[in-house]
Structures are given as structure tokens and as C-alpha cells.
């Protein structure tokens, strides 16, 4: 998700973000891809710990739960990348009903960028599904698959609409909780959450079938 933390301010102050595509800073592409890699490495670490300890003992359980919480915080960043296709809007100035030759290439740029988010989203869910299956079997996987999409949808909307970052939960927990409750108490917010959830289910199950051979995890 987009950020205004010191490292991004450094880039801004040094004009590294001067390169933009339809007013979308190119450096943000690298930043968002970095953010979606965080849960990937957390997932790998969790699987590694399980293989070594089977989460036996208080220490490994605490570490496992802590890492999973961080994974849950950062996992929405993969799905968030898909929403960046919104920056295609207005790519042809003063000519919204036609395609202008100068910027026609932007369609494929943002489409490809969105595909990266989709593949990462499916991979991350399957990465954790592998571990859930080892811990709780098929029933655990079923519960996980039906719960994870609405949770990620909520995370995406909190970043997209409310402009919260994954790490803001540490600094503004009450504000984020209040924002999350809006998606249960207000019809307009709830409608967006339901639609996002349904599309994430659809994108996951399509992707899971398309990439099934590529996303197999070693036992």
C-alpha cells in the first residue's frame, strides 16, 4: 500500500519519483512489489519453522502466531496491487471516449502490473494453505479459504479508501478498528466489502486452477 514513511520521503526529496506514468510514481511499483514480498518470506519462514519444530513447545508456538499475524497484516498488499489499474483512468487527456496513441501503451502496463498482484495473491493464499493443511487438515483448509478472502478484502479497502498502511495498526489501532467497523455498520462500505470479497473468491479459485502445477509446495 502507498506510504509516506521516511524512506519514501527520501526518494521524493531526491526527485527519484519524478518519473511517473499517468501521475503514478514508478518508484511506487517497486515499493508495492517489495511489500507483497514481505508475506511471501514470512510464509517461507513459518513453513521452515513447522518443518523443524512442528510448532511444539511454547517458544515455537509464540513465534508462529506472531509471524502469522504479520503475514495477515501484509498479505492484502498483493491484492492491493490489482487495484492500481485504477490509475489508467484519464490516461488520454481531454479525450475520455477514445484511445490516444501517445498513452495507449499504459493499458498493458497497468494490466501486467495487476496480473503480478493476482499471481502473488493466489500464491500467498496457497502458501499458507499448505501450512494450514499440515496443521489442521482439510477442514482447517476449508475454513481458512472461506475466511481469508473477506479479511484480505477488508485490508485492501482500508488501504485503498481509508489510506491506512499495514504497519499503522501498531500506531493507530483504535482508528483502524473504527474504520474496519464501518464496513460492517454502513451499507455503502459493506457493499464494497461484499463485492471485493466475491471477486477475490473468483480470482483465487480461477488462479488456483490455472497455476496449480506451479504452486505445488514441497512436502
Image (cartoon, rainbow, N blue to C red):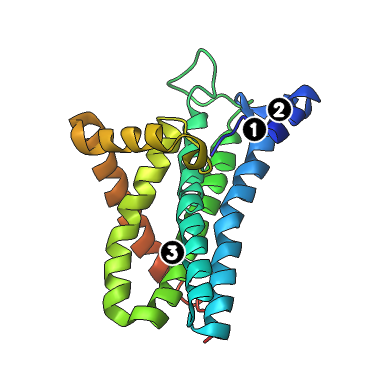
Judging from the image, what secondary structure is the residue with disc 2 in?
A: helix
Residue at (18% x, 32% y) in the render: 187
**Is 105 left or right of 139, judged from the image as shown?**
right
Disc 2, disc 1: CB below 8 Å? Answer: yes
With respect to residue 94, does 81 lie above or below? below
Calculate the distance from the C-alpha at mark 3 to the C-alpha at mark 2: 32 Å
Residue 103: image location, x then y, percent? 61, 28
Check disc 3 and report its element: helix, strand or loop: helix
How many callouts does the rendering have? Answer: 3
Residue 36 relative to residue 118: left or right: right
How many angstroms separate mark 2 from mark 1 (CA)?
6 Å
Instruction: Identify residue for label 2.
Output: 9
Which is closer to the viewer, label 3 or label 2? 2
Helix, strand or loop at disc 1? loop
Q: Which of 86 and 184 is in front in this view?
A: 184
- State the residue position of label 3: 125
Query: Residue placed farthest to the bottom in the image?
Result: 219
Residue drawn at x 42%, y 21% is 97
Tell me where residue 123 appears, x and y as whole percent. Answer: 49, 64
Q: Mark 1 points at which residue?
A: 5
Give the number of the mark in front: 1 or 3: 1
Residue at 57% over, 63% down: 42
CB contact under 8 Å: marks 1 and 3: no
Mark seen at residue 71: none
Q: Are marks 3 and 2 in contact (CB under 8 Å)?
A: no
Residue sitting farthest toward the top: 94
Amino acid at each position: 500500500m502507498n506510504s509516506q514513511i521516511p524512506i519514501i520521503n527520501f526518494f521524493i526529496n531526491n526527485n527519484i519519483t519524478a518519473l511517473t506514468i499517468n501521475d503514478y510514481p514508478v518508484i511506487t511499483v517497486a515499493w508495492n512489489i517489495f511489500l507483497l514480498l514481505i508475506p511471501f518470506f514470512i510464509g517461507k519462514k513459518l513453513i521452515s519453522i513447522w518443518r523443524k519444530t512442528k510448532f511444539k513447545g511454547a517458544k515455537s508456538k509464540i513465534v508462529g502466531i506472531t509471524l502469522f499475524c504479520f503475514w495477515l497484516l501484509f498479505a492484502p498488499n498483493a491484492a492491493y496491487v490489482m487495484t492500481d489499474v485504477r490509475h489508467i483512468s484519464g490516461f488520454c487527456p481531454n479525450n475520455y471516449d477514445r484511445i490516444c496513441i501517445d498513452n495507449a501503451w499504459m493499458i498493458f502496463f497497468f494490466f501486467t502490473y495487476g496480473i503480478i498482484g493476482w499471481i502473488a495473491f493466489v500464491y500467498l493464499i496457497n502458501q499458507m494453505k499448505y501450512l494450514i493443511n499440515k496443521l489442521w487438515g482439510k477442514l482447517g483448509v476449508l475454513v481458512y479459504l472461506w475466511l481469508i478472502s473477506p479479511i484480505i478484502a477488508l485490508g485492501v479497502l482500508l488501504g485503498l479508501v481509508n489510506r491506512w498502511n499495514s504497519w499503522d495498526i501498531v500506531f493507530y489501532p483504535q482508528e483502524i478498528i473504527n474504520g474496519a467497523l464501518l464496513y460492517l455498520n454502513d451499507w455503502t462500505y459493506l457493499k464494497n466489502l461484499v463485492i471485493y470479497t466475491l471477486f477475490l473468491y473468483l480470482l483465487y479459485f480461477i488462479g488456483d486452477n490455472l497455476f496449480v502445477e506451479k504452486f505445488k509446495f514441497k512436502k
